[in-house]
Image: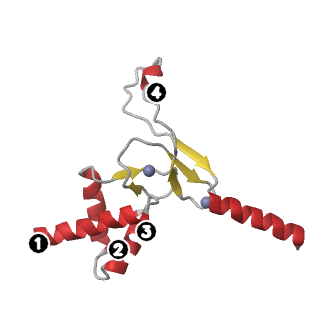
Amino acid sequence: MVRRNTIQREVVLRAVKSLHNHPSADEVYAYVTKECPNIGRGTVYRNLNILAEDGELRKAQATDGPDRFDHNLMDHYHVTCVHCGKMYDVDMEVISDVEERIHDKHGIKYLGYDILFKGVCPACQKEHEDKKEEAING
Ligand SMILES: [Zn+2]
Ligand SMILES: [Zn+2]
């Protein structure tokens, strides 16, 4: 039983790494069933959460919609496309002293922060361009 769980966990972890795009639990499930058609949705969800608890995956908070799972364990920021909702890593160094810059007047105990950028991904930019061209050319 232990062995079986390990295999399922590996399959789930490999799926997140292969998808490479901060998939939601549903997207991981859809991908995993291609390889293991008999795997249950609950099993995939459970293993994703265990992997996140064990630090083998990270959860990436989206502004709306479900949590995403990230195989990149380094500290980094995310940008989500405002059109399709896909999440990408931001190519920049993490600002290390954000919390040290706070001059707290409210007695807040700060626990952390999330920085989430908004943008338009290349595919959606292109789609937008195509639509503009269609409008011009009829
Ligand atoms: Zn997009
Ligand atoms: Zn990421």
Say whether mark 4 is within 8 Å of ligand 2: no
Amino acid identity at mark 3: Glu
Q: Look at label 4 and name its amino acid.
A: Val
- In the picture, measured across the screen, residue 126 lies left or right of residue 114, that is right
Circle 3: is it few (<14), some (14-19), or many (20+) Cα within 10 Å? some
Real-space Cα separation, disc 2 to disc 1, in angstroms: 19 Å
C-beta proximity under 8 Å, tags 2 and 3: no
Q: Earlier in the sequence, mark 2 or mark 4?
A: 2
84 or 13: which is nearer to us? 13
Q: Report the front residue among 65 and 107.
A: 65
Q: Is mark 3 within 8 Å of ligand 2?
A: no
Q: Tell me residue 76's x, y (percent).
A: 44, 42
Which callout, 3 or 1, points at the residue further toward the start of the chain? 1
Contact flag, marks 2 and 4 (Cβ < 8 Å): no
Tell me which residue sits at (66%, 61%) in the image. 124
Amino acid bearing label 2: Val
Judge whether 1 appears above or below 113 on screen.
below
Tag 3's secondary structure? Answer: helix
Q: Which mark is residue 98?
A: 4
Residue topped by disc 1 = 1
Q: Which of the two discs, 2 and 3, labels the residue nearer the N terminus?
A: 3
What residue type is disc 1 on?
Met
Q: Is residue 109 above or below residue 117?
A: above
Instruction: Tell me, for residue 32, which label it has, or none.
Output: 2
Left or right position of 67 against 134:
left
Q: CA distance from mark 4 to mark 3?
A: 33 Å
Question: How far across and down, in percent of the image, does residue 122 sit?
Answer: 64, 58
* Residue with the mark numbered 3: 27
In the rendered structure, which disc, 2 or 1, sits on the residue that comes first in sequence?
1
Asked whether residue 45 is in view, the answer is no
Residue shown at 32%/82% (left/top)? 37
